[in-house]
Image: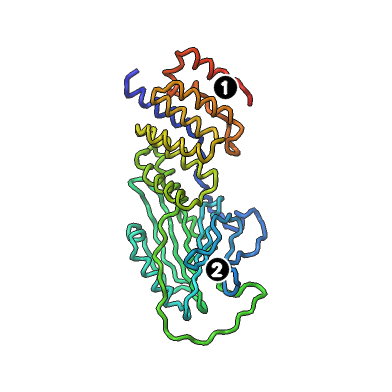
Amino acid sequence: MTSQERQAKTIKVLVLCVLCLWAFMSAEPIGLSQAASGTDEPPAFVAWPEKGLGLSIDLAGFKKDIDQVKPDGRRYLSALHHKTGLTVSVSLEKVPTRATAQGCIEQLQLIQKDPSVTHGQDIALNTTAAIPTLEYTLHKFRGVRLEHKHVHACLAQDNVYADIHLSKAHYTTADAPLFQSILKTIRLQPEPSTIIQATLPAPPRTIPIHPPAPPTSKELLEIGNVLYRQNKFAQAIPPYSKALDLETAEPQLDRTLWRALIDHLGMAYVMTGRLKEARALFEQGIQADPAYPIFHYNLACTFAELNELDHAMQSLKIAFRHRKNLNPGDKGMPDPRQNSSFERFMKHETFRNLVNDLTAAKS
């Protein structure tokens, strides 16, 4: 077997080390109410703890990721519709004076100048609709087609500005109704059963305008996953690494997605020959989540690539000891006998017996 053939085989089988925890989300053009399986959920109401004016929005079928008041006082909510892959975030901000439609337009114009928008395509600012919007699409990232659609919207009432951001990867024109169905449900209004007295006109004010937020760890994970599926492992490392930095500073991902981030970044290191970094990352994952077997299995793969037999055997033992702690829906532990990382060790009787015993065990 030539070195090129062996390298290709190694890459092919190493991918099997990672249980794919991230699947493409359905782009089926269905309405959000239908996607919610017929549930009759009332609109979500986003308000501050002291109540008062807030935002009513139909989030039927969505799962909230973040729901909090930021340190700067802004009210923030982020939610994902798993069926369609549509992400919605809402930010509410109180200002000292009256909020106006012109203030919303000025904010969208400022966002339009941000590099995160100017690097996109199909940029369109609509200031004549009932809700002003700014939309754009990121068609590609480093040569990989993403079709990541973004829509920023703004509402103003009394002394409150509401910024809404909708986004979806793998966007097609059939997805347009998804965005419109959300925008049509948005209202700024008093909280149910709460009466707000009319406010008197206030003098002109200068509103604080915030530039668009940088990509979240979930968005960076998605970008990395697209590159990873294209076997562009070197290009996947930067977004994965940035996502990990964000998670280290302020965790936002759930356990399954965090595990996927560690798995994929570690294996991207392995695929690109950065074995010491892969080892350090998997050991970091094990320290935080010691009972997750795939971290141990991937570490065993890494030790095998480093030609460290004893360490590889020890990691395999631990991996199979924790085999019951796989993610829900996983199909079971990978078979080391089908992994070319361990091929060099199969001539060792001790290693061969260990692998046969581990794979024969049922628990």
Q: Quadrant of residue 184?
A: bottom right
Quadrant showing the N terminus: top left
Rendering coords of residue 305 (x, y %): 40, 26
Q: From this view, report whether residue 229 is shown above or below residue 173.
A: above
The numbered mark, 2 or 1, whose residue comes first in the sequence reads: 2
Residue that label 1 marks: 359
What residue is rendered at 43% in x and 38% in y?
281
Rendering coords of residue 311 (x, y %): 46, 24
Q: From this view, report whether residue 323 is shown above or below residue 354.
A: below
Report the residue that reaches farthest toward the front: 287
Mark pair 2, 1: CA separation: 54 Å
In depth, the one of 184 and 224 nearer the eye is 224
Instruction: Categorize mark 2 by other alpha carbons within 10 Å: few (<14), some (14-19), many (20+).
Output: some
Helix, strand or loop for disc 1: helix
Instruction: Categorize mark 1 by other alpha carbons within 10 Å: few (<14), some (14-19), many (20+).
Output: some
Helix, strand or loop for disc 2: loop
Q: Say the numbered circle drawn on residue 316.
A: none
In depth, the one of 311 and 15 nearer the eye is 311
Rendering coords of residue 236 (x, y %): 38, 42
**Is 339 displayed left or right of 54 in the figure?**
left
**Is 41 displayed left or right of 305 in the figure?**
right
Quadrant showing the C terminus: top right
Residue type beneath disc 1: Thr
Residue type beneath disc 2: Ile
Rendering coords of residue 27 (x, y %): 51, 50
Q: Quadrant of residue 112?
A: bottom left
Q: From this view, report whether residue 184 is shown above or below residue 61.
A: below
In depth, the one of 83 and 352 nearer the eye is 352
Q: Say the numbered circle drawn on residue 186.
A: 2
Residue mark closest to the camera, 2 vs 1: 1
Q: Quadrant of residue 11?
A: top left
What residue is rendered at 50% in x and 34% in y?
295
